[in-house]
Image (cartoon, helix red, strand yellow):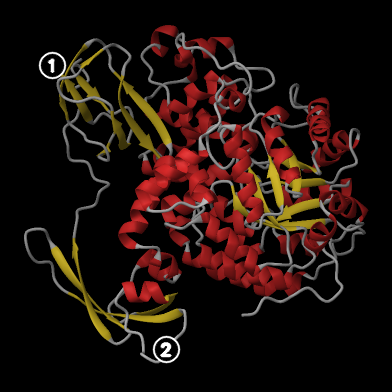
C-alpha cells in the first residue's frame, strides 16, 4: 500500500523538526493547548507484553498505518531499548535495517528511540566514541527523537549522548526516572526531581522526560511532580508510564491536566498489563477537556484491529499476566522487566516460587539502598534476586561475611558495586560493597571517561577479514555486542537472511503438509536458492511460492527426515536430522558433600569453561560461567587444586547442582 502523505500545508512535529530544528519543535510543543501523544506500540508495548518478539515486517505494516492515521502524534516510539539486541538474538534480524524500513514507511512522523545514555542500547558502559558513533548512525538511518536516560539519573552519564544528539540537530529528551512516591519518599521528593530537571536543562535538553518505568506514579503524584519540574524550566514535559498497577490511565489524565505536554500511550489492543495506557481510552476520556488531543478514537479502529491481529500471532510470548496488580508499588519492578522476569522464572524452574521472587526483588532493592531501577540497574536487582532464591539465601545472608565469602555473586552485581554502570547519588551501602567486592577496587569517576577510545578502524579490518565486508553499523554493533553479533553473522552466513522474508506464522510455527506460503526475495537470492525464474522476467525481486508437500518418516542412525517442498513449481528435498530437545539434562549431579565436585550454581547454560583437564587453579579463580536469560554467574574454584575432568562443555544445558567440573 502507498504511504499516505500529510495533507498539503499541514504542520506536525516531524515537518517542524525537519524545517526549523529541535528548538523550534520544543517551542511549538509548549505552544499547544492540546496534549500530544507518543505511540509506544512499536517498541515498549511489545517489549513489555510480548517479550520484544514482534518482527520487522509486522512493525513496518504498523508504521504505514500509523503514518496515515496518526499525523498529529508527536512521535512513534519504535526502536532502541531491548529491541536492538533481541532483533539479533532471537529474530535473526538486523535492527538497523528495521529502522530504515520503518523510516521509509512513516516519512511524516517523528521516530523515537530509547537510549540508555553511556550504555547506548546495551547493558554495560561503552567508550565515548562508541556511543557517539551509535548516535550518528541512528540519526543517519532516520531517528528523530532520542529519549535519553541513565539508570541513576546521573546527567554526567548522559552528557555525551545529549551533546551528540544536538550535534546532529535531533531532539534530545532527557529523562528523570521516577521511583517510589514523590508525595511520601524521603529520598525521591520534589527537591530531588527539581535538581535532576535543572541539571538536564543545563546539559542541553530539548525536553524533560518523566520515565515512570514501573508505573509507580499515582494520579495524585502527577501535579506535584509537574510543579517540581516547572519550577526550574519551561521546556516540554513528556510523561511515560506503565499500566501494571491499573492506575495508569488516571495518572496520564492527571498529567495532562497538570500541564504535561506529551503523554505515552499504546493502541488499545497493545495497552494495559505491563504496557502503557490505552490510546483509545485516553482519547475518549479526554474528549470534553480543553487539553484533549483532538483525535477521533473511532478513526483509530483500523490501527487497533491491526495490532489485535498481530498480537494473536505472538501468543506464546505473552507473559500470562491476566490482571493489574497494585503490588508493583511494593516491589517496584519495571513494566518492561516484569514480563521478562516471569519468563526467566519459568525457564529456571522457579515459577512455583514467583511470590518469593517478587519479595526478593523488593528486598534486594532495599539491600542496594533503594536505587532507581531501570535498565541496566533493574537487571542487577533482578539477577541477584533470582540467584538468591535459587540458592535459598536471604539478603541477610548476603551481609553475613562468613556466608557472603562463599557466594559467587552474579557478574552484574559485581559490575554494579565496582561502579561500571555509574553510581546512585547517595552511593551504595558500604557493608554491601565490602562483601561483594571482596577487596577489589572501585572505579573512580564516570565509566566511559576511564575507557580508552575504541579503535573503529581496527575493528572494521577485523570484521572485513572475517566476513568479507563491514558497514559502519556492523562495526559499532560488534563493539557493543561482540558475541551476539558474531552469532548473528554465523547464522546468516549459514542460512542467509531469507528467514526475515517469511510470514510470521511460518517463522514461528512452521508449516503443515499442504500449507502454502509466499515470500519476496531479491533476484540474486532467488538464484542462490535455485528458485526457477521465468526467462523473460527482468525484475529485481522474485515472488517465491512454497508448498510443503510431504515429510518422510525418520530413517537412519541419526534420525533423519526428508522434507519435500514445491518451490515455484519445482520439487526440492531437504534432509533434516532430528535431535532430542536441548533443554533436557541427563548428566551426573554434584555430590554436595564432595569438595572435589563443582556443581552449577543455577539452572541455565554453560556460557564458558575457563579451564581444561590438568590445569592447576587457585582459590577464587573463575573456572566456568553459567548464564540464564542474560544473567551470568561465575563459578569459582573453592581452593587450590588440579582439574581432573570437565563434565559439561560450553553450550551444555545444566540444572541447579549439575556436576560441571571435578578436581583430582
Q: Position of residue 170 (x, y in %)?
A: 75, 50
The quadrant holding residue 159 is top right
Q: Which mark is residue 392?
A: none
Rendered position, 400 above or below 118: above
Judge the density around disc 2: few (<14), some (14-19), many (≥20) Cα neighbours within 10 Å.
Answer: few
Task: Please give left or right for residue 294 compared with residue 395 in the image.
Answer: right
Which of the two marks, 2 or 1, is nearer to us in this view?
2
Q: Which mark is residue 537?
A: 2
Q: CA distance from mark 2 to mark 1?
A: 69 Å
Instruction: Evaluate if marks 2 and 1 touch, with contact meaning CB atoms under 8 Å apart.
Output: no
Task: Please give left or right for residue 559 compared with residue 377 in the image.
Answer: left
Residue wearing tag 1: 664
The quadrant holding residue 662 is top left
Task: Please give left or right for residue 50 compared with residue 298 in the image.
Answer: left
Rendered position, 662 above or below 256: above
**Helix or strand or loop: what does disc 1 sit on?**
loop
For the residue pair 340 and 394, the one nearer the viewer reads as: 340
Identify the residue at horizontal 73%, vertical 72% (top origin): 69
Identify the residue at horizontal 47%, vertical 79% (top origin): 540
The quarter of the picture where the N terminus appears is bottom right
For the residue pair 639 and 303, the one nearer the viewer reads as: 639
Task: Please give left or right for residue 432 compared with residue 284 in the image.
Answer: left
Rendered position, 659 above or below 290: above
Rendered position, 452 above or below 479: above
For the residue pair 386 and 408, the one nearer the viewer reads as: 408
Q: Position of residue 330 (x, y in %)?
A: 62, 32
Q: Is residue 300 visible?
A: no
Q: Position of residue 148 (x, y in %)?
A: 69, 41
**Helix or strand or loop: what does disc 2 sit on?**
loop
Count of all numbered marks drawn on residues in the image: 2
Q: Residue furthest bottom?
A: 536
Disc nearer the start of the sequence (2/1)? 2
Amino acid at each position: 500500500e502507498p504511504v499516505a502523505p500529510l495533507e498539503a500545508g499541514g504542520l506536525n512535529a516531524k515537518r517542524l523538526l525537519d524545517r526549523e530544528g529541535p528548538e523550534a519543535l520544543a517551542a511549538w510543543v509548549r505552544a499547544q493547548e492540546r496534549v500530544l501523544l507518543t505511540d509506544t506500540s512499536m517498541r515498549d508495548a511489545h517489549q513489555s507484553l510480548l517479550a520484544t518478539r514482534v518482527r520487522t515486517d509486522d512493525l513496518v505494516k504498523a508504521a504505514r498505518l500509523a503514518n496515515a492515521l496518526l499525523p498529529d502524534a508527536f512521535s512513534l516510539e519504535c526502536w532502541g531499548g531491548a529491541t536492538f539486541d533481541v532483533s539479533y538474538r532471537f529474530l535473526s534480524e538486523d535492527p538497523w535495517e528495521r529502522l530504515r524500513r520503518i523510516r521509509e514507511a512513516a516519512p511524516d512522523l517523528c521516530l523515537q528511540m530509547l537510549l540508555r545514555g553511556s550504555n547506548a542500547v546495551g547493558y554495560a558502559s561503552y567508550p565515548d566514541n562508541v556511543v557517539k558513533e551509535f548516535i550518528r548512525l541512528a540519526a543517519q538511518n532516520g531517528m528523530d527523537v532520542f529519549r535519553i536516560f541513565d539508570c541513576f539519573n546521573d546527567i554526567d552519564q548522559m552528557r555525551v549522548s545529549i551533546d551528540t544528539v544536538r550535534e546532529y540537530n535531533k531532539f534530545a529528551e532527557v529523562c528523570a526516572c521516577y521511583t517510589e512516591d514523590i508525595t511520601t519518599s524521603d529520598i525521591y521528593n520534589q527537591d530531588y526531581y527539581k535538581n535532576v530537571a535543572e541539571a538536564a536543562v543545563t546539559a542541553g535538553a530539548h525536553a524533560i522526560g518523566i520515565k515512570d518505568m514501573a508505573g509507580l506514579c499515582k494520579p495524585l503524584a502527577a501535579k506535584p511532580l509537574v510543579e517540581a519540574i516547572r519550577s526550574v524550566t519551561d521546556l516540554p514535559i513528556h510523561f511515560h508510564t506503565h499500566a501494571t498497577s491499573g492506575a495508569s490511565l488516571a495518572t496520564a489524565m492527571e498529567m495532562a491536566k497538570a500541564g504535561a505536554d506529551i503523554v505515552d500511550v499504546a493502541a488499545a489492543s497493545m495497552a494495559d498489563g505491563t504496557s502503557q495506557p490505552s490510546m483509545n481510552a485516553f482519547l475518549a476520556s479526554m474528549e470534553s477537556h480543553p487539553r484533549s488531543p483532538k483525535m477521533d478514537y473511532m478513526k483509530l479502529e483500523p490501527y487497533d484491529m491491526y495490532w489485535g491481529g498481530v498480537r494473536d500471532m505472538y501468543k506464546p510470548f505473552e507473559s500470562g499476566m491476566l490482571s493489574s496488580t497494585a503490588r508493583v508499588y511494593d516491589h517496584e519492578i519495571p513494566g518492561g522487566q516484569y514480563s521478562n522476569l516471569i519468563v526467566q522464572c519459568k525457564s529456571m524452574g522457579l515459577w512455583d516460587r514467583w511470590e518469593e521472587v517478587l519479595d526478593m526483588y523488593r528486598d534486594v532493592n532495599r539491600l542496594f539502598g533503594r536505587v532507581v531501577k531501570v535498565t541496566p540497574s533493574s537487571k542487577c536487582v533482578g539477577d541477584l534476586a533470582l540467584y538468591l532464591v535459587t540458592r535459598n539465601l536471604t539478603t541477610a545472608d548476603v551481609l553475613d561475611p562468613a556466608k557472603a565469602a562463599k557466594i559467587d555473586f552474579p557478574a552484574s552485581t559485581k559490575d554494579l558495586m565496582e561502579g561500571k554502570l555509574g553510581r546512585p547519588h547517595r552511593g551504595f551501602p558500604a557493608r554491601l560493597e565490602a562483601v561483594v567486592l571482596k577487596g577489589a577496587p572501585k572505579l573512580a569517576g564516570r565509566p566511559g571517561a576511564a575507557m580508552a577510545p575504541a579503535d573503529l578502524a581496527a575493528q572494521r579490518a577485523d570484521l572485513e577479514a572475517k566476513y568479507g565486508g563491514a558497514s559502519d553499523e556492523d562495526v559499532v554493533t560488534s563493539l557493543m555486542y561482540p558475541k551476539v553479533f558474531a552469532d548473528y553473522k554465523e547464522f546468516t552466513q549459514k542460512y542467509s537472511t531469507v528467514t526475515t522474508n517469511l510470514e510470521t506464522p511460518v517463522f514461528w510455527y512452521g508449516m503443515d503438509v499442504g500449507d502454502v506460503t509466499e515470500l519476496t526475495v531479491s533476484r540474486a537470492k532467488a538464484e542462490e536458492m535455485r528458485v526457477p525464474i521465468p526467462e523473460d522476467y527482468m525484475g529485481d525481486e522474485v515472488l517465491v511460492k512454497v508448498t510443503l508437500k510431504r515429510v518422510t518418516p525418520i530413517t537412519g542412525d541419526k534420525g533423519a527426515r526428508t522434507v519435500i517442498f514445491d518451490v515455484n513449481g519445482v520439487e526440492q528435498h531437504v534432509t533434516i536430522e532430528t535431535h532430542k530437545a536441548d533443554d533436557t539434562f541427563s548428566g551426573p549431579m554434584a555430590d554436595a558433600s564432595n569438595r572435589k565436585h563443582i556443581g552449577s550454581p543455577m539452572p541455565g547454560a554453560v556460557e564458558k569453561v575457563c579451564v581444561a583437564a590438568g590445569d592447576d587453579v587457585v582459590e577464587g579463580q573463575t573456572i566456568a560461567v553459567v548464564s540464564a536469560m542474560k544473567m551470568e554467574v561465575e563459578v569459582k574454584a573453592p581452593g587450590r587444586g588440579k582439574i581432573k575432568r570437565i563434565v559439561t562443555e560450553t553450550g551444555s544445558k545444566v540444572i541447579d547442582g549439575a556436576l560441571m567440573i571435578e578436581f583430582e
